Image (tube, rainbow, N blue to C red):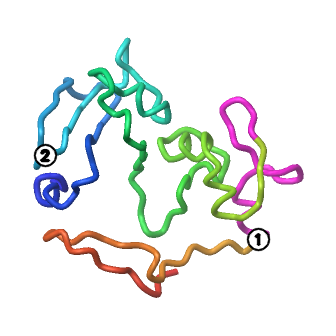
Amino acid sequence: TILEENGIHLKNIVCVRFDPFEECTDFERIIQGVKYRVRRNIGPMGKSQLCCVTDYEEMEAEFIECTLYKIVAWDHVSLPGNDYFKGSRNTDDGVTGAATNSMELITDVKGRYTKGYYLPPEGYHTWNGVAKKQKTQLTVDGNVKVATHTGILVDLKNIS
């Protein structure tokens, strides 16, 4: 796994929490000094994926000095929040896109919040329409780093 192979280089990560719906049992182990927690996202232990970092604590003040980062599987031909660009919240990336201002940050167009959604401005039905009108294009050119299996960071360049 990423933690087994690179955990020794990830000194600033305190915990990785994996929250499948109900496909497994809850467990925790330490991998290269990093807590790896699996917590099913059901019942009384179920947590919102974007709640306050301290809401994930299982011991008092466990994450008091931590910042929460949410990672969603993503591929090189999709936009972050890919499904939400089309107006769908039916996937993990769609829900994350709907709950954050990622669409605004990508398109440089301010939207508006309603309960459960970050909507495009008046006149647009989806963020995809905004992205097309703005001719939004994601470019990787020295602004993304990938960790190799040995922990060396490599800059990605000239990818659109």
At x 16% / y 55%, what residue is drawn?
7
Which kind of residue does numbered mark 1 sit on?
A: Gln
When asked about the image quadrant of residue 16, the answer is: top left
Residue 116 placement, left or right of 152: right
Q: Where is residue 18 in the image (x, y as percent from the top left)?
A: 29, 37
Q: What stretch is highlighted in magenta?
A: 113-133
Foreground label between 1 and 2: 2
At x 18% / y 69%, what residue is drawn?
151
Report which residue position mark 1 lands on: 134
**Alpha-carbon neighbours of circle 1 within 10 Å: few (<14), some, or many (≥20)?**
few
Is 158 in the magenta?
A: no
Which kind of residue does numbered mark 2 sit on?
A: Gly
Residue 33, numbered label: 2
Nearer to the camera, 71 or 93: 71
Residue 45 placement, left or right of 84: left
Q: How far apart are marks 1 and 2 (CA)?
A: 45 Å
Q: Where is residue 77 in the image (x, y as percent from the top left)?
A: 48, 68
At x 39% / y 21%, what residue is drawn?
46
Is 115 in the magenta?
A: yes
When asked about the image quadrant of residue 9, the answer is: bottom left
Nearer to the camera, 76 or 26: 26
Q: In this view, does 142 lie above or below 54?
A: below
User: Helix, strand, or loop for circle 2?
Assistant: loop
Q: Position of residue 50 (x, y in %)?
A: 49, 35
